[in-house]
Amino acid sequence: MKYLATHPYVKREANPHKLAVRFGKKCRQVRHEHGLSQLDMVRYADFSLSHYQKIERGDLDPRLTTIKRLADAFGVSMAELLDGL
């Protein structure tokens, strides 16, 4: 397994923290585009405010079900929410 991790032709996975940060920025962008506050989002998606704030800051790597709830709350598809990450 060590060989695969260091082999130059094996594509390394993206840093999950950086991906979480990019996803959080995307959520903030979409939320602003829809004119929603963070409080609106937690009401629509049924999250706690602190949970949603962690997502936007990139402190939390959301599960697939969380991404689906966010997409539904934004009124976009999951593909649109994940596009460009």
Image (tube, rainbow, N blue to C red):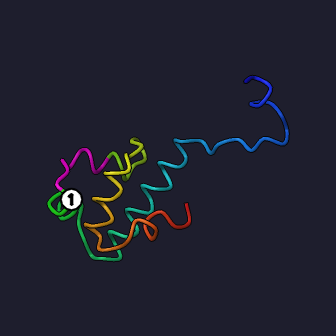
- Which stretch is magenta? 46-53
**Numbered-mark total:** 1
Q: Position of residue 65 (x, y in %)?
A: 32, 51
At x 30%, y 49%, the residue is 53
Label 1 sits on what residue type?
Ala
In the visual, does 33 lie left or right of 10?
left
Q: Position of residue 4 (x, y in %)?
A: 77, 31
Q: Main secondary structure of the magenta part?
A: helix
Q: Position of residue 75 (x, y in %)?
A: 29, 74
Q: Please, what secondary structure does the residue beneath circle 1 have? A: helix
Give the camera-side residue of 64 and 61: 64
At x 22%, y 62%, the residue is 41
Q: Which residue does the numbered mark 1 point to in the structure image?
A: 45
| Quadrant containing the N terminus in the rendered view | top right
Give the camera-side residue of 73 and 59: 73
In this picture, is 18 found above or below 41? Answer: above
Residue sticking out furthest to the right = 8
Q: Position of residue 17 (x, y in %)?
A: 52, 41
Give the camera-side residue of 51 and 14: 14
At x 74%, y 44%, the residue is 11
In the visual, does 28 lie left or right of 52?
right
Q: Quadrant of residue 59?
A: top left
At x 16%, y 54%, the residue is 46
Q: Quadrant of residue 76?
A: bottom left
Residue sticking out furthest to the top = 2
In this picture, is 51 found above or below 73? Answer: above
**Residue 81 among magenta residues:** no
Residue sticking out furthest to the front = 1
| Quadrant containing the C terminus in the rendered view | bottom right
Number of other residues with Cα within 10 Å of mark 1, as a class: few under 14, some 14 to 19, many 20 or more: some
